[in-house]
């Protein structure tokens, strides 16, 4: 072992390896492939990366001394680790440096879990008009009288048979031509991009071509694998954005870039690698599954051998990377910039200008995406610094610019993106909801992964809690405590928690904990002395801790819903409207949200409840529309030029609106549509609590 | 040492290293960086790669036995190595396999010497109209009211200030934009390609941009390094084509590709590496030269330290690769295809169709050329399989398509390329001169390198020889024998040799050695028993051999000049002309050729001698014209579409014309223009020898 390196072992995964001395444990964890949460991008402010240095186990691993194996305690750690835990060896991974060999335990709540990603393609009407089309050509062989070049002979045939003129060919495609022509006995299938450029030559007659539309979210990425000739979605593949390890939200990633010279490149390369894995996954699905060969009796352990196990009657396409000939890609401005290695620094600084708005056609090979070597990726245009290509995707899918109806489209991801209008005028804005509505940045907030609380009820009489976690169908009250294995609260549970806390009287309309409480679930945190409410007791959890929601958490959620409501309200006012004609909620949040609770909690202005619609992953649908219909690509640029971006924070009464909107529930009188829909007792209760104009919130 | 490898030492260079067993000595020489001639591309037919296995020296190198260290004698070797030399250990490098450790001696005549490359740029009229131009823009900083993207703000400024519209930007350039804008205090210099695409952003106001035009010859490559704003040629850089080690001529390289799976890639990569070295060389010339630091007295040997030694009053541009923003590139069809890794196999097979004729705009990064990352290389179009982009370059430089004069343009490289016509009609053809006129494929043919005979006189009375070699100004008769260090004959000496052999009576008009000879220089080769003539005795040579010209050599030259003359003649006839109005000879041959001797020897149809013109490296001039004037790029495609390619070998009397044209001298009566120009005694002598219609040549 070199003097400049140290051996690190991470428990409980057991991953181990040598790393250079002087790096932080978070950096070491990345090198060794261990996922530790780092929500803040190593700004030392989130306290999510708590780990425990297992000094006692050193001898077991023949590491004889722990003295001098880490740097000393850092001031920032005091905020997140109390004296007791400090004594037990807890540290923050982002400040603890490797100075010698270590055995490190990663507590479950610090582990970046695998999210349950589910972003299926919706049925939206799309015209068939793909950028890449295949043409078949029969070509005259060259003679002494007419020894014309291979490509010119193909061009002549394509003009004669298909009316295509002025074609060029990509160099990498041209390399295939001489043998494609001769192997196809002078007939050839030509893939043409935008009636302009040949991107592939195949021998003989072929009819199919394929593409994938990618929606790159801050947290999750999905790919819609399509047959470009039939528009059929063959498969939906998805993954966590591999950049999550560098920070949970957009600002954390931008910070990671600014604090690491190669940060941008690393985040980009990780994402590209992930995209390539998704492509391989999509392709793998076109082959029969592999089944392990049965061992014959008496046979020794052989290396793993697999056999194909095709389903009867099923045809398998057996595609290769070369068969993918077109890609589209949308994402918010930061994801867009990081993927393309465009400096995202200024997107994070007021007035948040992006490097460009234009859509782009980029050769896949230029950014390392492995499909047919001459293919392009179409990158959707960007509306503004905080309203990116993902929002353009939403617009392409929902087409508010084609109708008379005033649509309010809300895309709640890590930030809220808002569009309002119709074919006469469209305005957009973003509101700094933060990720609280998705469950992040709360004490026990987590992604939609197994163990996450997603539904909750609090008994107004006893304050007893009944809840459900992802990965288990039975509610708490039908389960034994140890069966719940709760770990935290995810986005879809957040609104429930807030509504129930309020309905049951645990918190008041201003969001503070009520003076009178009905159970020992309401208590003060032993360390911070701040009020908190226990959602799940230690014995119901898999992290050996009570899962609580704190006063600070409630404030975070209030801030988020206040920002969202105020944003919507100001936009509606700007358009000279009373209320929108309909509300569309895109994103995973829109799919899971309880429309009534959302209205009750005042997430957005009033609207007939049947005009509130979850539109699923509309951003992804828009990317898919752009894949299958080039007109959508033109619309994409139209959107980025014609949707007027409004900076709401400069409105004179923004602060006032924001403050008011943070109240619970938000001026229920403004929601006539709830009448008759919400249980009378709830409505009654809510009407009692008209929000005062003054507020505690600062 | 592994069992699968062997140590090879090459003498006299002393280069050594381990190579895998089983490869040939030629392959081993490439791996170890030893240059051995391989004219035929390892087809085992040229016999140029003779080496000697130095068995006696084994012990000196602690190699104890030579048994089994090579494969056995191959049939092909009999043709080139006689029994005596076989006994001395001579073998062919291309058939001798490495089976164990070896010490190998490379005789001087087998060494691929460094050629004296000289391809200076000529003054030809070129309009200033470069593809890449720089524009300066002052941009408004973004505000909350107008938070437009960086690129869109630059576009607005460029439209306002320069009228540029619909610009796109290359991704790699866009990556420079945010910091260029901010470092330039919102002013930026933009390099725009073809008024369409931004390929570079620089902070502040910059005025210069640079480009290089490359002419890729089979043997030599030259680059003209130009200031694109002033059109000035700043430097001319040149090198041997690094592919020479894979075979001397086009067919040898194509064969090398067909016989080696990675042959095409290797040849392409070697050439690209060479081009990158030329680029670096051009850039290095913009810095002051480095001078070694003087050692102080008593100082110990320090690592080499250099200081800049700028010339007084001289300004140095100090450019980087990024400052090169445009390239053009022309070469014959095979060089074009190999460089771009387009399969050249079918260019070598009748009817010789290229993969494409079109010119191409290729991103430099796609083929590994290191200049500014978003730059394009413009690759000139190709006329036909054997008339490539180099000939298009010649046309661009000479512009026969613009005048009334019927120009016959001859480009003698390794093959002869011919163009005839004027603005009404242009035809082209190629003739299989082979490389004999350039000195290759003769017994002692060599490139224009030190030691090459380039001028020769034979006394008609005594047959004594007087000659001059490259690298020594004094002729043989003013030198001591050992001062000559002759090594072979290069292209510019070939016509001299043939003319002098004939004038002095050594050979007759049909090219056979005369029965009566006047010195012991004419003799029969001891091995082949064929007649030969000694040009330089062993003691005048550096290769310890008499340098001779053989009967077979004379035949090769006759074939070459016959092919060229017949080709020209048939083209002139096709155009319905008696003779061309002028003859332009491009290439190194044209620069060095003695116009009178060329007419005497009948290289091309008669023409007033002052209308015969060497036009130097016209192909390179054409590439330079295309670099500085985009109209030339359009003309390039026009040429490849409108110059009619004529396959001369299908003409009914081609054989007859060819046979007649091989005679020496060719029907002098057809050259009235020689009267009064050529010394009377020579003309008289020639007129005596009217060629009979029958001939010995078969």
Image (spheres, coloured by chain):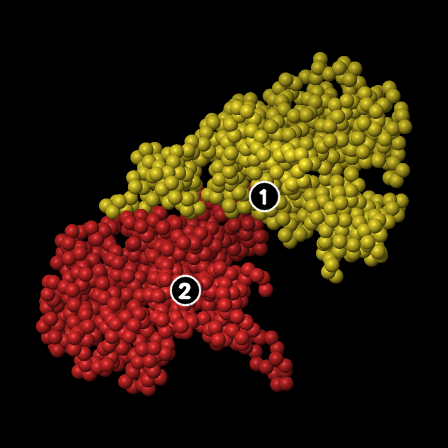
Chain colours: A yellow, B red
* Point 54% across, 62% down: residue: B5
Q: Chain of mark 2?
A: B
Q: Position of residue A182 (x, y in %)?
A: 36, 42
Q: Quadrant of the N terminus of chain B?
A: bottom right
Q: Chain of mark 1?
A: A
* Point 26% across, 81% down: residue: B466
Does residue A371 sit above or below B411 in this rendering?
above
For disc 2, the neighbor class at 10 Å (few under 14, some 14 to 19, many from 20) is few
Task: Tell me: B330 left or right of A506.
Answer: left
Secondary structure under badge 2? Answer: loop
Q: Which residue is mark 2?
A: B73
Estimate the spatial distance between the alpha carbons at disc 1 and disc 2, rounded to whole Å.
Answer: 55 Å
Q: Which residue is mark 1?
A: A272
Asked whether A655 or B642 is in front, the reply is: B642
Task: Tell me: A661 left or right of A521.
Answer: left
Q: Position of residue B606 (x, y in %)?
A: 15, 64
Asked whether A34 or B316 is in front, the reply is: A34
Secondary structure under badge 1? Answer: helix
Residue A663 visible in the current orientation:
no
Camera-near label (1 vs 2) is: 2
Does residue A362 sit above or below B263 in this rendering?
above
* Point 27% across, 74% down: residue: B525
């Amino acid at each position: 072992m070199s003097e400049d390196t140290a051996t690190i072992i991470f428990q409980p995964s057991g991953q181990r390896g040598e790393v250079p001395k002087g790096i932080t444990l978070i950096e070491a964890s990345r090198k060794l492939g261990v996922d530790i949460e780092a929500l803040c991008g190593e700004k030392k402010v989130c306290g999510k990366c708590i780990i425990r240095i297992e000094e006692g186990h050193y001898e077991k691993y023949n590491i004889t001394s722990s003295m001098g194996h880490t740097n000393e305690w850092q001031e920032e750690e005091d905020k997140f680790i109390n004296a007791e835990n400090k004594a037990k060896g807890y540290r923050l991974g982002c400040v603890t440096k490797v100075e010698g060999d270590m055995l490190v335990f990663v507590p479950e709540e610090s582990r970046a879990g695998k999210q349950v990603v589910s972003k299926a393609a919706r049925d939206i009407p799309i015209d068939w008009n793909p950028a890449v089309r295949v043409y078949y050509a029969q070509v005259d062989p060259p003679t002494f009288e007419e020894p014309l070049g291979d490509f010119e002979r193909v061009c002549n045939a394509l003009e004669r048979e298909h009316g295509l003129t002025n074609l060029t060919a990509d160099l990498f495609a041209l390399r295939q031509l001489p043998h494609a022509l001769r192997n196809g006995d002078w007939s050839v299938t030509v893939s043409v991009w935008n009636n302009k450029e040949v991107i592939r030559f195949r021998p003989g007659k072929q009819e199919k071509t394929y593409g994938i539309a990618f929606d790159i979210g801050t947290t999750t990425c999905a790919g819609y694998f399509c047959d470009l000739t039939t528009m059929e979605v063959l498969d939906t593949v998805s993954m966590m954005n591999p950049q999550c390890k560098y920070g949970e939200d957009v600002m954390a990633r931008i910070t990671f870039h600014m604090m690491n010279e190669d940060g941008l490149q690393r985040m980009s390369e990780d994402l590209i690698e992930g995209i390539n894995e998704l492509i391989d996954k999509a392709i793998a699905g076109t082959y029969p599954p592999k089944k392990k060969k049965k061992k014959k009796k008496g046979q020794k352990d052989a290396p793993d051998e697999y056999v194909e196990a095709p389903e009867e009657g099923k045809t398998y396409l057996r595609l290769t990377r070369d068969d993918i000939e077109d890609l589209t890609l949308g994402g918010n401005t930061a994801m867009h910039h990081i993927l393309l290695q465009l400096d995202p620094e200024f997107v994070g600084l007021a007035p948040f200008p992006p490097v460009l708005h234009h859509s782009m056609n980029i050769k896949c090979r230029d950014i390392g995406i492995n499909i047919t070597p001459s293919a392009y990726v179409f990158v959707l245009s960007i509306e503004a610094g905080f309203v990116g290509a993902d929002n353009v995707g939403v617009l392409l899918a929902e087409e508010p610019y084609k109708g008379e109806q005033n649509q309010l489209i809300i895309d709640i991801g890590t930030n809220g993106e808002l569009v309002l209008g119709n074919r006469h005028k469209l305005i957009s804005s973003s509101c700094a909801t933060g990720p609280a509505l998705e469950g992040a940045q709360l004490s026990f907030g987590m992604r939609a992964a197994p163990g996450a609380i997603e539904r909750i009820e609090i008994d107004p009489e006893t304050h007893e809690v009944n809840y459900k976690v992802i990965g288990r169908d039975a509610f708490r009250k039908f389960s034994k405590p140890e069966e719940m294995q709760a770990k935290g609260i995810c986005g879809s549970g957040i609104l429930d928690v807030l509504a129930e806390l309020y309905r049951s009287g645990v918190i008041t309309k201003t969001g503070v904990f009520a003076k009178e409480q009905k159970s020992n679930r309401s208590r003060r945190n032993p360390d911070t002395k701040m009020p908190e409410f226990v959602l799940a007791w230690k014995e119901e959890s898999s992290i050996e801790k009570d899962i609580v929601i704190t006063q600070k958490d409630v404030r975070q959620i209030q801030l988020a819903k206040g920002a969202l409501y105020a944003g919507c309200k100001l936009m509606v006012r700007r358009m000279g409207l009373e209320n929108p004609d309909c509300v569309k909620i895109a994103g995973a949040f829109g799919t899971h949200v309880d429309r009534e609770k959302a209205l009750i909690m005042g997430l957005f202005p009033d609207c007939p409840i049947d005009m509130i619609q979850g539109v699923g992953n509309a951003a992804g649908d828009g990317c898919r529309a752009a894949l299958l219909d080039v007109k959508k690509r033109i619309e994409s640029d139209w959107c980025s030029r014609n949707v007027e971006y409004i900076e709401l924070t400069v409105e004179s009464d923004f602060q006032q609106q924001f403050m008011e909107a943070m109240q619970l529930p938000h001026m229920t009188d403004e929601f006539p549509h709830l009448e008759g829909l919400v249980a009378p007792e709830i409505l009654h209760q809510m009407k009692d609590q008209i929000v005062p104009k003054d507020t505690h919130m600062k």
